[in-house]
Each structure stands twice: as C-alpha cells, then as structure tokens.
Amino acid sequence: MSQTAPDPTQTVTPPPQVWPTLRARDARALIRFLVDVVGFTEAAVYGDGDFVHHAELAWPPGGGIMLGSVKDGDAEASVSPPGAFGAYVVADDIDALHARVAAAGATITRPPETTDYGSREFAIKDPEGNRWTFGTYRGAPRTAT
C-alpha cells in the first residue's frame, strides 16, 4: 500500500485517521457532558429522538471520537459495553480543565498531578462510567519513515 507524502502547503489539518469509538446507554446525555463540560465540539450527530445512530466529537487541538447509542441485542455491546471505554486526551492547561470539570460535578478519579515523566495529568469518569485521562504528554517523538 502506498502513501502520499503530506503537502507542506496545506493549511487545513487533515481529519483524524484513527477514531476511538464507544457506545452509550444515553448517548445524548454523554454528548452534552463531553461538549458542555469537557470541551469537545460536535462535528456530526445523527439520530432519532433519544437514539443516536452516529456522532462525531472533535477535540479542538486535534483528533476526535465517534459514539452512538447501544442497541438492545447488539452483539458488539458484549465486546465493548457502555462504560468500558478509556482514553488519554492531550490538553495544554490541565489545571484549568480540571477546575472546569470539577465545578461541573464530574467524578474525579485522580486529581491533577505531575508524573515522573513530566506530564501534568488528571482523570475522570463520565456519566456512563468511561475513563478519561487528560494530560500534557504528547507521546514519544517519532522519526520519519
């Protein structure tokens, strides 16, 4: 499989190519929490009434997630049930983000701390029970291939 080299003149960030996905019992409430409290933005939400067929939420610094409502009898739900998701999300101002989610009543599972590898981090559980860690660590440097 061949890859096209990135265009150095491109001014628009390309869309994410890896999308973490999760299911929710109350997807609309989870979307509101992730947008209104955490700071994601709605890129797309398709659904009927309380049921969300597909939603895309963007993380402003880059990346995003997809989610939808769990269906009764959904075989995939046994593999990835609501509340079983976990993600690490890079953010710049960890203390301000922590203050915002704490003020909104989010369940803090680990208060802000600085790790031994220099990342400032904290963790929460969302209303569905999913685990979210927010930190300044952007991953190990990569070499061009």
Image: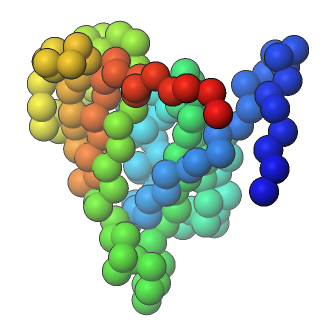
Q: 11 and 33: which one is in front? A: 11
Measured as percent of width and height from the top left, residue 114 is found at 16, 15
Residue 31 seen in this snapshot:
yes
Comparing 26 with 96, the one in front is 96
Q: Quadrant of residue 54?
A: bottom right
Q: Quadrant of the N terminus?
A: bottom right
Query: In the current view of this chain or complex, which residue is farthest to the bottom?
Result: 73
Give the quadrant of residue 85. Answer: bottom left
Instruction: Please provide percent x and percent y for residue 52.
Output: 56, 62
> Residue 143: x, y in percent?
55, 26
For the point 29% across and 61% down, which residue is it? 84
Compared with residue 40, is residue 103 higher up or lower down, i.e. above or below? Answer: above
Relative to residue 88, is residue 76 depicted above or below? below
Quick check: 135 above or below 21? above
Q: Is residue 75 left or right of residue 11?
A: left
Q: Which residue: 87% across, 14% down?
A: 9
Asked if 36 appears above or below 136 in the picture, the reply is below
Q: Residue at x 49, y 57 (%)?
A: 21
Residue 33 or 16: which is nearer the viewer? 16
Picture coordinates of residue 81, whole percent (x, y):
33, 70
At horizontal 79% and vertical 44% (from top left) the residue drawn is: 3
Give the position of the C terminus as an image quadrant.
Answer: top right
Task: Give the left or right position of residue 24, taking residue 106 as reference.
Answer: right
Quarter of the image where one finds residue 136? top left
